């Protein structure tokens, strides 16, 4: 099995329940295509290297999975 890491950056201004739902959706996508999530590590809010859609911060989540 191959090991993968996926870093997801979501809008830092969204509500906590929406952020949790977004992470769950990512986990569902991984499972749908035959992967198994082994670890989810929430890094929290971090400053972006450059503005994206006029936002300077993002909420980072690292998802590790095997496929």
Image: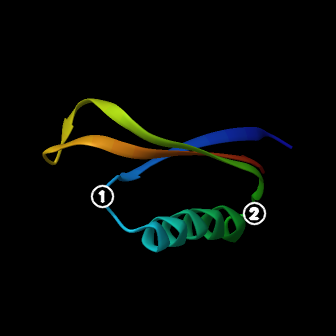
Residue drawn at x 58%, y 43% as measured from the top left: 6
Say left or right for 2 vs 55: right
Mark 1 and mark 2 lie on one chain; the one further toward the N terminus is 1
Vertical comparison of 46 with 12: above or below: above
Q: Residue furthest top?
A: 49
Residue drawn at x 16%, y 48% as measured from the top left: 53
The image's colour scheme reads: rainbow
Say left or right for 41 vs 60: right
The alpha-carbon separation of the residues under discs 1 and 2 comes to 32 Å
Say left or right for 21 vs 33: left
Query: x, y (%) of residue 57?
Result: 30, 41
Vertical comparison of 17 with 64: above or below: below
**The N terminus appears in which quarter of the rendering?**
top right
* Structural crowding at the residue carrying mark 1, measured as other residues with C-alpha within 10 Å and reported as few (<14), some (14–19) or many (≥20): few
Residue drawn at x 46%, y 67% as measured from the top left: 16
Q: Secondary structure at mark 1?
A: loop
Q: Which residue is mark 1?
A: 13
Q: Nearer the viewer, residue 30 or 54?
A: 54
Query: x, y (%) of residue 52?
Result: 20, 42
Query: x, y (%) of residue 15?
Result: 38, 68
1 vs 2, front mark: 1
Q: Which residue is mark 2?
A: 34
């Amino acid at each position: 099995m191959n090991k993968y890491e996926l870093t997801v950056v979501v809008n830092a201004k969204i509500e906590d329940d929406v952020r949790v739902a977004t992470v769950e959706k990512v986990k569902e996508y991984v499972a749908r295509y035959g992967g198994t999530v082994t670890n989810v590590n929430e890094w929290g809010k971090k400053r972006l290297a450059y503005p994206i859609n006029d936002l300077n911060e993002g909420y980072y989540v690292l998802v590790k999975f095997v496929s």
